[in-house]
Image (cartoon, rainbow, N blue to C red):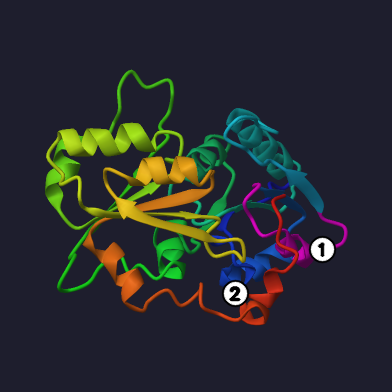
Amino acid sequence: MKLGKVYLVGAGPGDPDLITRKALRLLGEADVVIYDRLIPPQLLWEARPDAELIDAGKEPTKRRLSQETINQVIVDRALKGKSVLRLKGGDPLVFGRGGEEALACHKYGIHFEIVPGISSAYAVPAYAGIPLTHRHLSSCFTVIAGHEDPQKPESGIDYEALAKIGGTIVILMGVKRLTRITRTLIAHGLDDKTPAAIIEWGALPRQRTLIGTLSTIAGLAREGDFQAPAVTVIGEVVRLRERGLQWFDLLPADLVAPSQSANEIV
């Protein structure tokens, strides 16, 4: 039997209108769609009526399918000649484990294609009115994972270098470890008064944003019961939000992405 093809596709950060045209076209052609929990569920309406839909969503405290199982499902369907679309929130290669899935395909000689998506690393701060760079405030930004592989003997992040590099720091998947991360950065010399923000459910109508400093943001997030998914931004650019850039928060209710009205977690 002829092998199928696998598409590793980014759905964007939450707003269903942010998916690319190519991703939307491939979604409507696929035999099998394997999707994550943070993809806008309306996007599944774009799949063929006869497509097999597989929920592979993973949550911080529980998983529907392990990553190893997801890899095997992708491979199994492709080996049967199916066109398989792996739909992932954000970008498939930015902390999305798309690289692992691509390697699984390569191992079995399955042709794959990667379709980049808009990453939450920069889209969510943009929806909160926080540009990651500004010529007077920040000439670079660094994105780190707040939740690393628990099997690693130690963190793969050089926090000492991170505290010294300057610019903007963006933390993905870091809500549970925010206190530890911020204290570590302070211990390595980053000013505890550095502005910081945490954005929950970014690019969705339920988006919430908290502003504080490096020393206070973890406590504020805890008091406000901020949960995953959330993005944390540390740096002087955070100040720009309060200087008139919080565009999404100020939209009239009927204009806040009306296409997302039914957007709930899968």
| Residue name at image x 46 percent, y 59 percent | 209
How far across and down, in percent of the image, does residue 198 sit? 41, 53
How far across and down, in percent of the image, does residue 21 sit? 60, 74
Look at label 2 and name its amino acid.
Answer: Arg
| Residue name at image x 46 percent, y 77 percent | 247
Q: In front: 65, or 183? A: 183
Left or right, residue 179 beside residue 7: left
Look at label 1 and name its amino acid.
Answer: Arg
Left or right, residue 9 beside residue 190: right
Left or right, residue 1 beside residue 63: right
| Residue name at image x 60 percent, y 81 percent | 252
* Residue with the most extreme front position: 223
- Any magenta on residue 223? no
Q: Which mark is residue 77?
A: none
How far across and down, in percent of the image, does residue 204 sit? 59, 64
Q: How many marks?
A: 2
The N terminus sits in image quarter: top right
Q: Using the image, determine if residue 229 lies above or below residue 155.
A: below
Q: Is residue 126 visible?
A: yes
Please state the extent of the stretch shown in magenta in the rendering.
Answer: 36-51
Cα separation, mark 2 vs mark 1, equals 16 Å
- Any magenta on residue 45? yes
The local secondary structure at tag 2 comes to helix
Q: Residues within 10 Å of mark 2 (few under 14, many from 20)?
A: few
How far across and down, in percent of the image, does residue 148 sit? 40, 32
Name the residue that disc number 1 marks.
48
Name the residue that disc number 2 marks.
21
Q: Residues within 10 Å of mark 1 (few under 14, many from 20)?
A: some
Q: In front: 253, or 139? A: 253
Q: Using the image, determine if residue 51 lies above or below residue 152.
A: below
- Dominant secondary-structure state across the stretch colored magenta: loop
Which is nearer the N-term, disc 2 or disc 1? 2
